[in-house]
């Protein structure tokens, strides 16, 4: 497989089940370079568990995860420098201001001290954070903390981006900024996985939309299709009706 | 050791310096122990019987040795609580604040981050030791020991040794805070450390127990062989390794 055709992310048969039946029960997922792949599903569908599995936050009971062709347990630590993620909580320390949080995130992604300051400055400009650069994260609104977290996840120009419900708490201006930031990075070759519990602005820019229900991928929506919302709920409803009989 | 260890130490140091928690604990330890010691010295000087009873065999010891003994008595218990809380915060806050998720999928290994936290904690504890020693020296000079007991000033060295060894003995709190995913389990472990130390001290077999030996040595140096202090680093080494392993194997499954 050539470099250009190797998926940024390739997950096969992922299983991680929790007591009570929740979790992920066997999902395949792939993201090509330059592709935005959205996973949509209701709360508790297994989206966050799936994202945790592909990022090594959880170990699968079965299945494999490959990032740029390298299987996860064998992946060298340096590989993670090319990954950016925000799953649930933004990496924004309450005691640090916006700029310091971005510098810390850049340094943890392996960027040197001097370059990290430049990277943070670019992120402040891209995500319109100048007003909050010197404000402690503890004093930021939830939406602005999310904006800092998104900037921290994207500023080092990762080749694989994984964002769990990234529009949470964002205002409409923030949503547009995020959408543009993701489109720019996809155009530059990044593979992007985003989740949402509804068909929000970011899910709508995806090249592929996979619907997740009760820990399984139950189908795909055509991002160009009309009345996506109706198609989404129809798919969920049909799956729920089918499930008890299965 | 990862090449990014220096980066992890720099990041942890920046977090510790920016936070009010570590500075407040340092101020409480230094100010609190100094104020209590001063109070006990003044009480003893005025012949307060209750204070003299609390001081036990130290009541008859004057000069630098007496002052250092009083400080050691307070530091032995108070220091464990302060250092245990500091470690519980450093490790437990990542879970309580949810920032632990951002410490995954990084080129810096999580075990490296855990060891960087312990390194920053150790440097901070050395700073606390230096400050407390300076504060006690000022109290001693104020009591005139500079003139009346010039030869005894060497006794002061027991304070930084006790503070640093006490800090090392608290590392299990970091491990428990990690296993318990929060601050409270670490603080609970700290309380257990204090209780265990008290039990060993009361039943009188403390001189070879790492958890108790530094305190007994600092209060009454002749009662404890110095060699027993060499066992103390075994506690941070074992629990530091357990901590690094726990961070390396960490899953966000709760």
Image: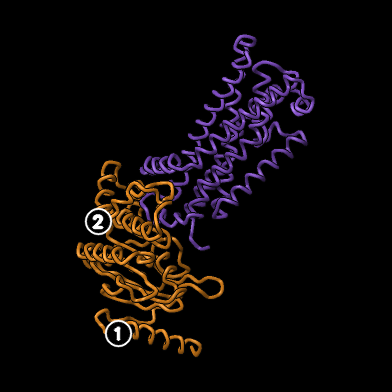
Chain colours: A orange, B purple
From the viewer's side, name the closer residue of A120 and A162: A120
Query: On residue B211, which mark appears?
Result: none
Relative height, residue B250 to residue B170 (above, below):
below
Horizontally, residue A135 falls left or right of residue A20, namely left
Q: Earlier in the sequence, mark 2 or mark 1?
A: 2
Quarter of the figure with the N terminus of chain A: bottom left
Q: Which residue was labeled with disc 2?
A: A126
Task: Label 2: state its secondary structure.
Answer: helix
Relative height, residue A220 to residue B73 (above, below):
below
Count neighbours of disc 1 (C-alpha within 10 A) and say few if under 14, some if 14 to 19, many if 20 or more.
few
Q: Position of residue A196 (x, y in %)?
A: 37, 72
Q: Mark 1 lies on which chain?
A: A
Q: Position of residue A90 (x, y in %)?
A: 40, 57
Q: Residue at x 50, y 55 (%)?
A: B95
Count neighbours of disc 2 (C-alpha within 10 A) and say few if under 14, some if 14 to 19, many if 20 or more.
some
Q: Which residue was labeled with disc 1?
A: A227
């Amino acid at each position: 497989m050539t470099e250009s055709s190797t998926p940024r992310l390739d997950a096969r048969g992922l299983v991680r089940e929790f007591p009570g039946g929740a979790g992920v029960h066997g999902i395949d997922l792939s993201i090509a370079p330059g592709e935005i792949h959205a996973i949509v599903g209701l709360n508790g569908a297994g989206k966050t568990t799936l994202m945790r599995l592909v990022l090594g936050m959880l170990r699968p009971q079965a299945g494999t995860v490959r990032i740029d062709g390298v299987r996860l347990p064998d992946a060298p630590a340096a590989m993670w420098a090319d990954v950016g993620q925000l799953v649930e909580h933004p990496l924004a320390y309450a005691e640090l201001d916006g700029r310091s949080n971005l510098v810390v995130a850049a340094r943890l992604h392996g960027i040197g001290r001097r370059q990290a300051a430049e990277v943070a400055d670019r992120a402040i400009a891209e995500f319109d954070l100048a007003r909050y650069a010197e404000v402690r994260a503890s004093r930021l609104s939830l939406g602005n903390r999310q904006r800092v977290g998104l900037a921290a996840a994207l500023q080092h120009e990762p080749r694989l981006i994984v964002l769990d419900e990234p529009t949470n708490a964002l205002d409409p201006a923030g949503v547009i900024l995020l959408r543009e930031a993701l489109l720019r990075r996809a155009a530059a070759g990044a593979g992007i996985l985003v989740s949402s519990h509804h068909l929000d602005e970011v899910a709508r820019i995806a090249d592929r939309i996979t619907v997740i229900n009760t820990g399984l991928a139950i189908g795909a929506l055509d991002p160009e299709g009309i009345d996506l919302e109706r198609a989404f709920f129809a798919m969920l409803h049909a799956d729920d009706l089918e499930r008890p009989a299965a | 050791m990862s090449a990014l260890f220096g980066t992890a130490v720099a990041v942890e140091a920046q977090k510790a310096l920016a936070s009010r928690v570590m500075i407040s604990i340092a101020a409480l330890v230094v100010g609190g122990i100094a104020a209590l010691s001063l109070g006990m010295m003044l009480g003893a000087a005025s012949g307060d019987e209750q204070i003299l009873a609390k001081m036990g065999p130290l009541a008859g010891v004057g000069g630098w040795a007496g002052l250092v003994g009083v400080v050691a008595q307070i530091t032995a218990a108070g220091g464990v609580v302060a250092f245990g809380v500091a470690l519980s915060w450093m490790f437990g806050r990542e879970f309580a604040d949810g920032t632990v998720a951002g410490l995954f999928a990084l080129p810096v290994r999580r075990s490296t981050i855990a060891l960087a936290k312990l390194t920053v904690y150790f440097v901070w504890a050395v700073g606390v030791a230096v400050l407390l020693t300076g504060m006690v020296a000022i109290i001693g000079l104020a009591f005139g020991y500079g003139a009346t007991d010039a030869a005894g000033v060497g006794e002061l060295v027991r304070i930084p040794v006790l503070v640093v060894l006490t800090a090392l003995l608290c590392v299990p709190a970091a491990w428990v805070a990690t296993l318990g995913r929060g601050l409270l389990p670490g603080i609970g472990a700290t309380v257990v450390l204090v209780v265990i130390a008290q039990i060993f001290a009361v039943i009188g077999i403390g001189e070879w127990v790492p958890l108790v030996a530094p305190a007994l040595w600092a209060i009454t140096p002749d009662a404890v062989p110095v060699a027993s202090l060499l066992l103390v680093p075994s506690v941070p080494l074992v629990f530091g390794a357990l901590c690094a392993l726990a961070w390396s194997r960490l899953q966000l499954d709760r």
